[in-house]
Image (cartoon, rainbow, N blue to C red):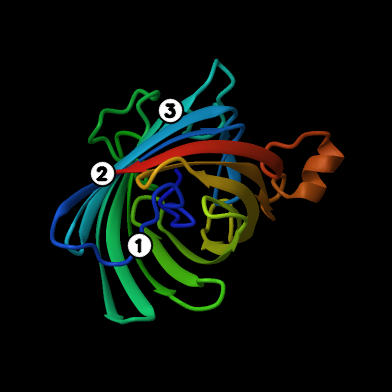
Amino acid sequence: MKKLSVSALSMLGLCAPAYADTLTVDTTVGFESRYIFRGVQFAETSFQPAIQLNYGNFYGGAWLNLPVGDDDLVVTPGGEELDLYAGYSFSPSESVTLDIGVTYYTFPDLTSGFFDIFEEDGDGLGANTVEIFAGVSLKTVLSPTLYIYRDFMFDTFTVEGSASHSIPLSEKASFDLGASLGYVLDDDPGDYFYGSVSADLSCALSDAGSVSAGLRYGGSDIAGGSLIDDSIAGTLKSSGLWWGISFNASF
């Protein structure tokens, strides 16, 4: 399960300001050396395309994770993943944007059908889940955001905050920094913290397109998932350093 952590929708930014009453399209083609979602690794090297449609204050889109090769992890529902989402974003003032929406996480590489959902009591047919979210972002120093997520199938609550800052390098280039910290309330495997930081070099290719590349570092304090535990075990399956590159275009 990924991106719509607004940290999720880091791919396309669910916390974007309200759009004009015309239909616009945002596209992203990303490539990540690891797919880590909320401090847990779901796949190794992955191709991540995404598309988002915007009309007025409404938006909707799809995000896809496609592992490269056969190295996706099988210990968790992951690997191939298709997430569909929709939401409503509006600004009650010039400095505040509010955002609400819903995400449907699906896993095409599993035996589940598209509408087969997961249920903790064992009555579910598959691994797919539904999550609602609400958040606020501020147009101020470090562009802080705060989001709350509720996954009905896994019965979890997630609170996540993020901040970002862009340093102009030239008329077309910038150095973009980001950080996020979250907390998941979950009886199984238990509550845990997670976080990540990122640094990207971005360059505008045109008025509507850009490319960025950079490094990410993150993980969680889940037993066996923290950097300390991973180092002792001699693995880096849920924490550590990875890299990514993306091409973005709007129409």
Foreground residue among 223 and 144: 144
Q: Which mark is residue 80?
A: 3
Asked if the residues shown at circle 1 and circle 2 are in contact, with their CB atoms under 8 angstroms apart, the answer is no
Above or below for 6 versus 85: below
Q: Is residue 210 left or right of residue 202?
A: left
The spot of residue 54 in percent (x, y) is 22, 53
Image quadrant occupied by the C terminus: top left
Foreground residue among 119 and 213: 213
Three-letter amino acid code at the position of disc 1 = Ala
Does any portion of residue 46 appear in the rendered image? yes
Asked if the residues shown at circle 3 and circle 2 are in contact, with their CB atoms under 8 angstroms apart, the answer is no
Q: Which residue is at a point 63% across and 43% down the rendered structure image?
A: 214
The spot of residue 133 in percent (x, y) is 34, 63
On the image, which quarter does residue 234 sit in? top right
Rate crowding at label 3 as few (under 14), some (14 to 19) or many (20 or more) other CA atoms within 10 Å: many
Mark 1, residue position: 16
Rate crowding at label 1 as few (under 14), some (14 to 19) or many (20 or more) other CA atoms within 10 Å: some
On the image, which quarter does residue 196 sit in? bottom right
Q: Which mark is residue 251?
A: 2
Q: Which secondary structure lies at badge 2?
A: loop
Three-letter amino acid code at the position of disc 3 = Glu
Image quadrant occupied by the N terminus: top left
> Between marks 1 and 3, how big is the CA–CA gap?
27 Å
> Between marks 3 and 2, how big is the CA–CA gap?
27 Å
Q: Which secondary structure lies at badge 1?
A: loop
> Between marks 1 and 2, how big is the CA–CA gap?
16 Å
For marks 1 and 2 on the same chain, the one whose residue lies earlier in the sequence: 1
Does any portion of residue 127 appear in the rendered image? no
The spot of residue 142 in percent (x, y) is 56, 72
